[in-house]
Image (cartoon, rainbow, N blue to C red):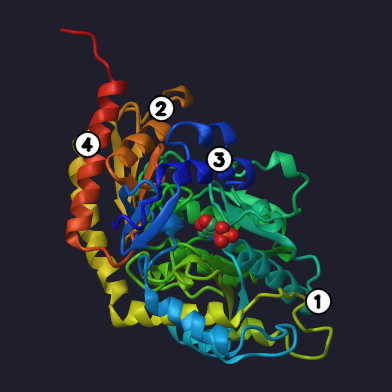
Amino acid sequence: MSDQTRLPLDKREDYRQRALAHLWVHTRQWNELAEQDGLKVFVDGSGARLVDAEGNSYIDALSGLWVVNVGHGRREIAAAAYEQMKQLVYVNTFAHASLPPIDLATKLAELTPGSLSKVFFVNSGSEAVETALKMAKQYHYLAGQQKRYKVIARRHSYHGTTLGALSVNGSRAVYRPYFEPLVPGAIHVPNVNCYRCDYGLSPANCDVLCAKMVEQTIQFEGPDTVAALIAEPISTAAGTHIPPRDYWKILRDICDRYGVLLVADEVINGFGRTGKWFGSQHFGLVPDIMTLAKGLSSGYLPIAATVARKEVAERFKGGRKEAFAHGITFGGHPAAAAAALKNIEIIESEQLVENSAEMGAYLLNSLEALRGHEIVGDVRGLGLMCALELVKDKKTKERFAESDDIGARLTRSLSKRGLLTRAGEIVQLAPPLCVVRQDIDEIVRIVDESLAELESELLVRPPK
Ligand SMILES: Cc1ncc(COP(=O)(O)O)c(C=O)c1O
């Protein structure tokens, strides 16, 4: 951290005041942000580290929002975008193409499993999900199955914030009631959760009921009304539960049996986050449609994509009426595509997928030691996508009350020690894929200390 990066006190305060007056920080409340330490303003980043305007350094243990897979400060990505902007900044995406999106689509066809090979570019994960759902509906419509409009999603899932994506979300985290009525046809089934199974079963005797029951749901709804099933291969929003071995095979078979398109939301799982290029690959899953965002460009510029299997894309061939009725001005922006191509080149040349698998195993193994804490109920993860689940009582798995405010307390405690992440009942740990052992050791040490602090505050015992 150089003195040039640190802002002088008066400038810092000026920025803070203008942020509070004019910048609408997503999902956060003004008064929280106005509190001392409520709003952090960052000015610099390198690798897995961020520096705020006061000059404090932090380890970015959430890669922003599971975004910055190659780490901060990659000048070669900035240079690739700059060169493209100098050469050609934009062409009509409803009619023409430019070189970077063609190269990127070709690369994605090569990296994604099976016959996934036709790429529709958009700008965000939510748009990729909207695109997938509309694609599934028009796909069935074109086959004369106009009644297929329902989408099966899982409880506690998150697929985005725009209305279509919000409608399939299985969580109340982005409050639904304000925006109801939502897009009709979303059906929610239980998610994977081997720690708190919805059916009260344990992995040894569950027979993967959470997957098998989806068949009953389709039968009940009427197979000729169901367009798609959407799910993350490993759901982060639901608490990073790793599905049982056969889970995805069962769901793939059910979808095939009833002609339901399977959409794998790889917005977080993709680009090495789980220790393989895509989360689907841990389970031998080839989805019909895959959504990609975040790690596609590591956030250097906004870009996302919906990738269809060849067989799905072919349905849209024909005349004007068959063309996919969907378009977005900035989809496949040349500079964003150039940034994404360079990002993928870095992931390949630095073997970051392999590093994610190796460092992820090291992180998970190190986190196991934290089970000794009275409030750590479970430790889970795959690749650099790990989570701790905190409980008030380990034996009964009783949850903390909202009034315990563990999220805010733990977040403060971690940040005071130089670690940024999302912490609450679930503590997410997903640093950039370029981390080394020392970074992981630092993450685990800080989490360990913060948990001890939280425990001593929460579990005040009467003197013996
Ligand atoms: C699995 C998943 N899908 C979709 C989205 C929406 O992405 P975006 O915020 O880029 O719209 C997210 C965002 O976190 C996500 O986690």
Sequence order check: which comes first, mark 1 or mark 3?
3
CB atoms of marks 3 and 2 within 8 Å: no
Decide: is 151 above or below 331: above
CB atoms of marks 2 and 4 within 8 Å: no
Residue visible at 44% across and 81% down in the picture: 79
Q: CA distance from mark 1 to mark 3?
A: 57 Å
Q: CA distance from mark 2 to mark 1?
A: 51 Å
- How crowded pointer 2 is (Cα within 10 Å; few <14, some 14-19, many 20+) is rated as some
Q: Which residue is mark 3?
A: 17
Q: CA distance from mark 2 to mark 4?
A: 19 Å
| Rendering coords of residue 71 (x, y %) | 35, 66
Please tell me whether mark 3 or mark 4 is closer to you in this view: 3
Residue 112 appears in view: no
Element type where label 4 sits in the image: helix
Element type where label 1 sits in the image: loop
Sequence order check: which comes first, mark 3 or mark 2?
3
Q: Which residue is mark 4?
A: 449
Mark 2 C-beta to ligand 1 under 8 Å: no
Q: Mark 3 belongs to which amino acid?
A: Gln
Q: Mark 2 belongs to which amino acid?
A: Phe
Q: Which residue is mark 1?
A: 144
Please tell me whether mark 1 or mark 4 is closer to you in this view: 4
Question: For this rendering, which residue is in front, 253 or 100?
Answer: 100
Please tell me whether mark 2 or mark 4 is closer to you in this view: 4
Q: Which residue is mark 2?
A: 400
| Rendering coords of residue 46 (x, y %) | 33, 63
